[in-house]
């Protein structure tokens, strides 16, 4: 039985009514030209706190963003109620292009990468010299992640009153990584704040480190009005700290321009997402020497041209050793 006329474009074609009464779906997305810019301060269970001008606004992702993530440090476009009043909710309709992305995976076998922060300029790697003991492999992994993301690394060593810093610093001196050494007394009298702050001015700096190394305590001294961030102690049995920071949080520096992003303490820093060939980019004195390397060179084999490059005086051999240590870190789990 014919349901329609001979011409399918005729008016007798029946159209199924839209029972829900809403508008039909379309692939055309609104431009939201009236959206205002916001800066993501923290993300908690789908609620996103943003700085809009001089006030904080709670927002959620618009459906049109799909699976695109919103992370601390993102620059976003927001529409809706932007008053910041209690019980109001705005919508994030666009995530602007990120200048940098710091990523990690749960371990080296995990194919799913997690974005830690966006648009950071610097990565402060906080490590205690004792209680808990320093873990150089963790530092190496954070350095690889920083170089891969295009961030400037900063090594922050705490609790120097419990152990000397010389041995650890000597291992990283060939890399030319800037560093700050602080003690618990420095934290108490404010000297640590002055030492660290001069490295943070006019930058967005993400702080990472194991639990218990004093990361959040240091952040609290840099941003004293936000001392509601709790701090913990190191477990006397395991030698490890407790996770007291549960979500990343961006805070404005006090006294100078700049932002610090306190991140949760980590037990591991997987590098499954890092292409080892990009690590060499952090060594501009060694990179030209790779032109003589065989195709697919791992830079740790007999045919590698970097040995001769260093032997000819184009680069310090200690720098080559540091490069190979970082490349080996990509294939070795922290703690091995």
Image (cartoon, rainbow, N blue to C red):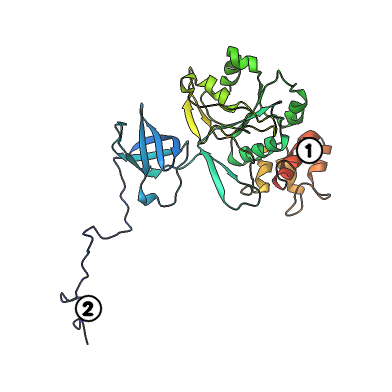
Residue 168: image x %, image y %?
Answer: 75, 28
Instruction: For marks 2 and 1, give the CA distance.
Output: 75 Å
Residue 37: image x %, image y %?
Answer: 37, 36
- Indicate which disc residue 330 carries: none
Task: Residue at 71% x, 38% y: name it.
Answer: 137
The quadrant in which residue 132 appears is top right
- Indicate which disc residue 321 carries: 1
Q: Is residue 301 left or right of residue 106?
A: right
Crowd band around label 1 with a 10 angstrom C-alpha radius: few (<14), some (14–19), many (20+): some
Q: Give the mark nearest the N terminus, 2 or 1.
A: 2
Q: How many marks?
A: 2
- Asked whether residue 316 appears in the rendered view, the answer is no
Crowd band around label 2 with a 10 angstrom C-alpha radius: few (<14), some (14–19), many (20+): few
Q: Secondary structure at mark 2?
A: loop
Look at the image and tell me in which quarter the N terminus lies.
bottom left
- Indicate which disc residue 8 carries: 2
The quadrant in which residue 285 appears is top right
- Asked whether residue 232 appears in the rendered view, the answer is yes
Q: Nearer the viewer, residue 44 or 82?
A: 44
Q: Is residue 323 left or right of residue 123?
A: right
The quadrant in which residue 263 appears is top right
Task: Residue at 81% x, 49% y: name it.
Answer: 301
Q: Nearer the viewer, residue 265 or 271?
A: 265
């Amino acid at each position: 039985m014919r349901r329609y006329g001979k011409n399918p474009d005729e008016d007798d074609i029946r159209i199924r009514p839209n029972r829900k009464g809403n508008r039909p779906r379309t692939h055309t997305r609104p431009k939201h030209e009236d959206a205002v810019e916001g800066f993501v301060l923290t993300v908690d269970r789908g609620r996103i706190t943003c700085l809009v001008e001089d006030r904080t606004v709670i927002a959620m992702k618009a459906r049109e963003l799909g699976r695109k993530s919103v992370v601390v440090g993102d620059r976003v476009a927001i529409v809706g109620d932007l008053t910041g009043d209690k019980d109001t909710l705005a919508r994030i309709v666009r995530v602007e292009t990120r200048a940098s992305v710091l990523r990690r995976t749960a371990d080296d076998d995990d194919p799913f990468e997690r974005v830690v922060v966006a648009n950071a300029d610097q990565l402060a790697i906080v490590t205690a010299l004792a209680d808990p003991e320093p873990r150089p492999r963790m530092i190496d992994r954070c350095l690889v992640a920083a170089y891969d993301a295009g961030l400037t690394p900063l090594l922050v060593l705490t609790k120097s009153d419990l152990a000397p810093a010389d041995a650890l610093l000597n291992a990283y001196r060939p890399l030319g990584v800037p560093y700050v050494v602080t003690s618990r007394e420095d934290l108490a009298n404010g000297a640590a704040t002055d030492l660290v702050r001069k490295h943070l001015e006019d930058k967005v700096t993400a702080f990472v480190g194991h639990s218990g190394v004093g990361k959040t305590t240091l952040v609290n001294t840099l941003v004293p009005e936000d001392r509601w961030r709790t701090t913990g102690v190191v477990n006397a049995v395991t030698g490890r700290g407790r996770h007291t920071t549960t979500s990343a949080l961006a805070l404005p520096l006090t006294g100078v321009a700049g932002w610090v992003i306190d991140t949760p303490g980590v037990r591991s820093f997987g590098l499954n997402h890092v292409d080892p060939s990009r690590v060499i980019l952090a060594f501009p004195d060694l990179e030209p020497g790779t032109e003589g390397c065989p195709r697919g060179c791992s830079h740790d084999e007999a045919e590698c041209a970097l040995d001769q490059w260093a032997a000819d005086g184009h680069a310090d051999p200690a720098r080559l050793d540091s490069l190979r240590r970082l490349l080996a870190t990509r294939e070795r789990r922290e703690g091995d």
